[in-house]
């Protein structure tokens, strides 16, 4: 089936680049995106909390939980913010 859709110029350019990088046509990229959206494989809705799975370990004292992951992400964000602030002072 053929149809016409309107998308903004920036999104169109980004889609063309992504399709070229993947070695597929824009038509194939759009079709893949629609299939993913319909199957529910797209990005989670804004505000949706992502729960990380537990990662097993033979040593039960070193289990990594979603709390550990969130804490590490927050620490990385803080370090990045501090590095950016230092670079702005120069």
Image (cartoon, helix red, strand yellow):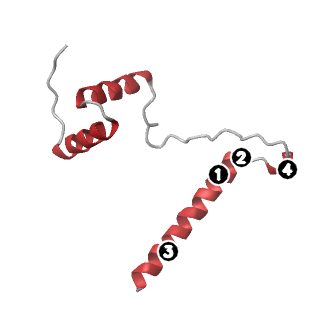
User: Looking at the rendering, which quadrant does residue 41 occupy?
Assistant: top left
Disc 4 is placed on an element classified as helix
Residue at label 3?
A: 83
Residue density around tag 4, few if under 14, some if 14–19, many if 20 or more, within 10 Å: few
User: Looking at the rendering, which quadrant does residue 5 occupy?
Assistant: top left
> Viewer-nearest of labels 2 and 3?
3
Mark pair 1, 2: CA separation: 7 Å
Disc 1 is placed on an element classified as helix
For this orientation, the residue located farthest to the front is 23
Q: Is residue 20 above or below residue 89?
A: above
Mark pair 2, 3: CA separation: 27 Å
Query: Label 2 near label 1: C-beta < 8 Å?
Result: yes
Residue 72 coordinates in the image, percent (x, y): 63, 58
Q: Residue at x 32, y 41 (%)?
A: 21
Of the pair 45 and 89, the residue shown nearer to us: 89
Q: Residue at x 64, y 57 (%)?
A: 71
Residue at label 1?
A: 69
Residue density around tag 3, few if under 14, some if 14–19, many if 20 or more, within 10 Å: few
Residue 81 image label: none
Quadrant location, the N terminus: top left
Residue at label 2?
A: 65
Residue 61 coordinates in the image, percent (x, y): 85, 50
Mark pair 4, 1: CA separation: 16 Å
Quadrant location, the C terminus: bottom left
Residue 11 coordinates in the image, percent (x, y): 23, 43
Residue 61 image label: 4
Q: Is residue 71 above or below residue 23?
A: below
Residue density around tag 2, few if under 14, some if 14–19, many if 20 or more, within 10 Å: some
Residue 43 coordinates in the image, percent (x, y): 44, 37
Residue density around tag 1, few if under 14, some if 14–19, many if 20 or more, within 10 Å: some
Q: Residue at x 16, y 20 (%)?
A: 3
> Viewer-nearest of labels 4 and 2?
4
């Amino acid at each position: 089936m053929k149809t016409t859709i309107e998308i903004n110029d920036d999104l169109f350019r980004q889609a063309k680049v992504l399709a070229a990088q993947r070695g597929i046509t824009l038509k194939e990229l759009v079709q893949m995106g629609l299939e993913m959206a319909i199957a529910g494989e797209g990005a989670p809705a804004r505000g949706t909390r992502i729960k990380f799975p537990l990662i097993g370990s033979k040593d039960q004292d070193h289990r990594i939980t979603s709390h550990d992951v969130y804490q590490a992400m927050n620490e990385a964000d803080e370090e990045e913010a501090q590095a950016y602030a230092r670079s702005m002072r120069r």
